[in-house]
């Protein structure tokens, strides 16, 4: 399995396994579901670039989680963003054959409402080295 796939799977497990978030949302998905009620979480696509050293393979990637909520529940959306951040920060530090060298918050943003929904995105940068 590629490191991108392993990172997305680890992110999915971290979000789904975070008790406070799991109790507040209706599901975690890799793509927008046809029939899901808000709130729910979407695991973002992932692109990685080289972050290796002379003697070790490494990758740098951006991880993102989008929380989708009802447009009128802005305060709740902010709480869910905080829980998503906590879930990401609790990810394991060994993922398959890779060790996390750093995990850093990049940004979070609440996006404009569209079709009765409001979305917030949380993004982290992760750097990993092959074990």
Image: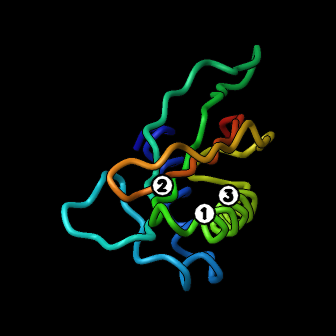
- As measured in the structure, the alpha-carbon distance from the residue carrying label 3 to the one carrying label 2 is 21 Å
Left or right for 23, reference 88: left
Q: Residues within 10 Å of mark 1 (few under 14, many from 20)?
A: some
Please name which of the two marks, 3 or 1, marks the residue nearer to the observer: 1
The residue singled out by tag 2 in the image is 118
- As measured in the structure, the alpha-carbon distance from the residue carrying label 3 to the one carrying label 1 is 21 Å
Q: Secondary structure at mark 3?
A: helix
Q: Residue at x 40, y 44 (%)?
A: 1
Going from the N terminus, do you reach mark 3 or mark 1 first? 1
Q: Secondary structure at mark 1?
A: helix
Going from the N terminus, do you reach mark 1 or mark 2 first? 1
Relative image position of residue 71 (x, y in whole percent): 47, 61
The residue singled out by tag 1 in the image is 74
The residue singled out by tag 3 in the image is 88
Q: Measured along the vertical axis of the image, is residue 115 above or below residue 84? A: above
Q: Residue at x 74, y 36 (%)?
A: 106
Quadrant containing the C terminus in the rendered view = top right
Q: Measured along the vertical axis of the image, is residue 15 above or below residue 117? A: below
């Amino acid at each position: 399995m590629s490191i991108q796939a392993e990172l997305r799977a680890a992110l999915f497990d971290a979000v789904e396994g975070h008790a406070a978030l799991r109790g507040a949302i209706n599901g975690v998905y890799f793509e927008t579901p046809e029939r899901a009620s808000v709130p729910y979480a979407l695991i973002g696509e992932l692109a990685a670039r080289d972050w290796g050293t002379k003697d070790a393979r490494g990758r740098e990637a951006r991880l993102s989680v989008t929380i989708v909520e009802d447009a009128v529940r802005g305060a709740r959306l902010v709480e869910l963003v905080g829980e998503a951040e906590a879930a990401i920060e609790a990810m394991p530090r060994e993922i398959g054959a890779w060790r996390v060298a750093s995990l850093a918050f990049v940004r979070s943003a609440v996006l404009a409402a569209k079709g009765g929904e409001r979305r917030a995105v949380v993004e982290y940068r992760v750097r990993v080295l092959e074990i």
